[in-house]
Image: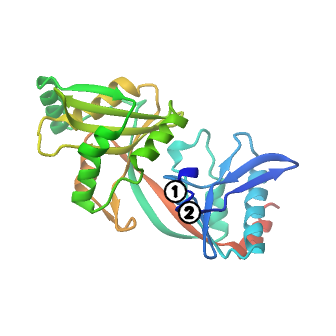
Amino acid sequence: MEYHQHRFEDYSLLIYNKNKLVALLPANVKDDILYTHQGLSYGGFLLSENISFSSVLESFQSALKFLSDNKINKLVIKQLPKIYLSVPSDELDYFLFILKANLFRRDVSMAIDLEKKIKYSKLRKREINKAKREKLRLEEGEEFSLFWNEILAPNLKEKYGVLPLHTIDEISNLKLKFPDNIRQFNVFDGDKILAGCTVFETEGVAHLQYISTNKLVKKGALDYLIHHLITKIYTGKKYLDFGISNENQGKQINSGLLKWKQSFGASPIVHDFYEVDVEKYSLLKTIMI
């Protein structure tokens, strides 16, 4: 997270049990509020795989008490979507219920279960076949500048007036540090790039971090790219995550974007955001009887 250090004041927590690290919370602080790190796509507590329920309870309670003792009044948690869990782990959901935490935002993402039979819409099939007739070429590359400069940045600036969250230097440095977890795929017509996708991989999920296409060239390039990822590249993963389709802090959904993802067979999952009053940590003491 060091490439974000100029944007956020780090306040990450390490939680130990008898000198053994059992949990951690990537986080940053602003005023008297702690956020599960705002520079990360997903957040929440990261737990060791074999940790017991009681240890999770003690860890969370200790973290809240530490924050309270250090004049942090509120914890804002951006929960990790369930598809990213290596094992079932809903302890924190239960503790947030006990603490009467405020669910203030819920984003809708779309994901494909790659272990099930996938059904495309008729339109997606037509677009994929169009791309095949055009004999478009798909390549995996080691650099990002062509996609960033020719497709991604111009599209984001035109539609939303923003730039990609990562600069070319930042995404390139991340690639150097995590060469097996960040991949770039581009589609070409001859030497001209038509579409691209930057993928962040975990053990079970391929997350499409950036997806964009040249909208003036109607050759089915982006549909062809997604089809290739589903059927050729990520057959060994459990899920392909398209990312959120929300705008206005989760209160509205871009219907066109959501329908496009759904037309590949994707289904909704949610990203939940909670506000916790840390002074209520004592409520966790009464759980176990």
Is residue 113 in view from this perspective? yes
Residue 218 coordinates in the image, percent (x, y): 11, 39
Give the mark nearer the N terminus: 1 vs 2: 2
Hey, what amino acid is under mark 2? Phe
In-image side of 138 versus 33 (left or right): left
Is residue 262 in view from this perspective? no
**Residue ID at (29%, 51%):** 153
Mark 2 nearby-residue class (10 Å; few <14, some 14–19, many ≥20): some
Q: Quadrant of residue 246?
A: bottom left
Residue 11 coordinates in the image, percent (x, y): 66, 62
- Compared with 233, 112 (above or below) is below
Q: What's the distance in space between the residues labelled 1 and 2, CA to CA?
A: 8 Å
Q: Secondary structure at mark 2?
A: loop
Residue 91 coordinates in the image, percent (x, y): 66, 54
Judging by the rendered image, the residue that carries numbered circle 1 is 39
Q: Nearer the viewer, residue 57 or 154?
A: 154
In-image side of 51 versus 239 (left or right): right
Judging by the rendered image, the residue that carries numbered circle 2 is 8
